[in-house]
Image (cartoon, rainbow, N blue to C red):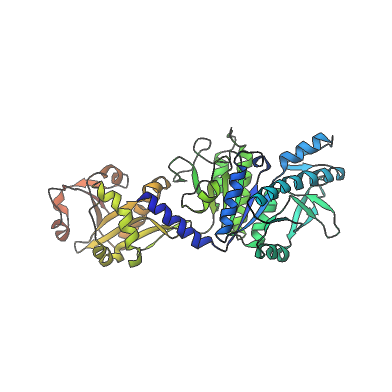
Amino acid sequence: MLQTERIRDVIRYIKKFGGTTIVVRIDDDIVDSPLFAGHMHDLALLQETGIKIVIVPGAANRITEVLNAYGVDWEMRDGVRITGEEGMNFIKMAAFDISNQIMTRLAAERLTAVIGNWVRARGRGIIDGLNYGSAGFVDRIQLESLTAALDDGFIPIIPCVGWTPTGKPYNISSTELAVATAVALKAEKLFFMGSGATVSVEDYRMPENSALSPEGRLAAIAVDDIDAFIALNQGVVNEHCPSEEIFDMLRRGKDACLRGVTRAHILDADIEGVIPAEIFSDLGSGTMMYRNDYGSFRAMTRDDVPAILSLMNPFVEKGILLPRSSESLEQEAADYVVYEIDGGIRACAALHGFPENMGEIAGLAVDEAYAHMGIGPKLMDLLIKKGQERGFSSIFVLTTQTADWFERFSFKSCEIERLPAKRREKWTEKRNSRMLIREF
């Protein structure tokens, strides 16, 4: 059953993302990784599904290596590399070397890539008395020619170099460039790929009700929560990837989402298959930043019935839920709320009303793979609020195995005789469900 659901997820996401554009910012240390060929192969597979791909290679390590080899002075100031104008030729050499290595690997996958100068830049100039020399900003992306390359089936590779209208080159941050490119293209996704770039409970403090994967990775974070996450983790030392790099990706991802990119992602390049896993599954394999609703509650429709039956089935088999038929779900559809992630139903519950001015929360099920994301508590809060809005004097639940969980929401045990008359008719001693109630 689990494998079947995964296949359905893949099919659903292929339909969703076919024809869309993704921008991938790749650290240059990935080029020497044994997983590099696999990542390029995955990009080839993505293109076959109709996804358009743009690659922005980072070249920080290679630039450092080349500048040092040729004895060119440089320094870092607030994450910006500063050299004199004489260093720019060596920076170009390094940036295009990394881009050429990526293009060569893509050629081995029978993909046609093209390295282009789609970036107009301007110099940083002198700030607070400091001359930033060869360091520049993105002025604009030449969208028309970049789009034409994509439409012709090419994979554009954009080095971290931009030119002024007079042809003067500047070194540009690859993360800034990736954001500018994704914004200009109105990309569906922006990926930041780096070695060890995993945001997990192993390395970071997580805010309450964070959307965690079963293994403790931060699966998703709203842009409104990013600043709080960074503040919570100031001073944290990450042995796998410098925290400041993670924070920079979070800030850049937030900026991209606020400027129109649908979603931004941090991916650990040390994980094989990390790109397709992030795209073709709800929990993904990295950390997703989003502005629009990643997952949202909505009223159930009759079209949801097959998915809800599938969601409930594991809980029915364990004796936690009573079995339900398609007909009964259709009849009670107005009472149900579902939680949807990218078209997949991952949780559901109903609020039934009775003449005694009581409500019942029933049929509550959360996909076990998403249990760490705090969906269940959010669903309970929503239903409790709905019960108050409907004017119920109390709401109750019947349970055999999850009483402790409901007690977290101020439900207390009571005598089964308090059940509404109609609901009392369905209660059986064989099942012997406990009744818990919350008064308003």
Q: Is residue 336 above or below residue 239?
A: below
Q: Residue 177: percent from the left, percent from the top?
A: 70, 53
* Residue 78 in sight from this viewpoint: no
Left or right position of 27 against 350: right
Q: Position of residue 298 (x, y in %)?
A: 39, 62
In the image, is residue 362 above or below residue 410? below
For this rendering, which residue is in front, 32 or 406? 32
Nearest the camera: 211 or 394? 211
Q: Compare residues 151 and 293 and report the one nearer the observer.
A: 151
The reply, left or right, for residue 305 in relation to residue 113 is left
The residue at the point 80 percent across, 50 percent down is 170
Tell me what residue is drawn at x 43 percent, y 60 percent. Answer: 343
Residue at image coords 32%, 52%: 365
| Left or right of 280 on screen, residue 325 | left
> Residue 122 at what x, y percent from top left?
80, 55
Q: Quadrant of residue 90?
A: top right
Estimate the x, y position of residue 153 in percent, counting from the top left.
65, 62
How many discs appear?
0
Image quarter of residue 330 = bottom left
Q: Quadrant of the C terminus?
A: bottom left
Viewer can see residue 411: yes
- The relative height of residue 6 versus residue 232 in the rendered view (above or below) is below
Task: Specify whether 153 is left or right of 413.
Answer: right
Is 72 in front, or is 127?
72
Q: Quadrant of residue 21?
A: bottom right
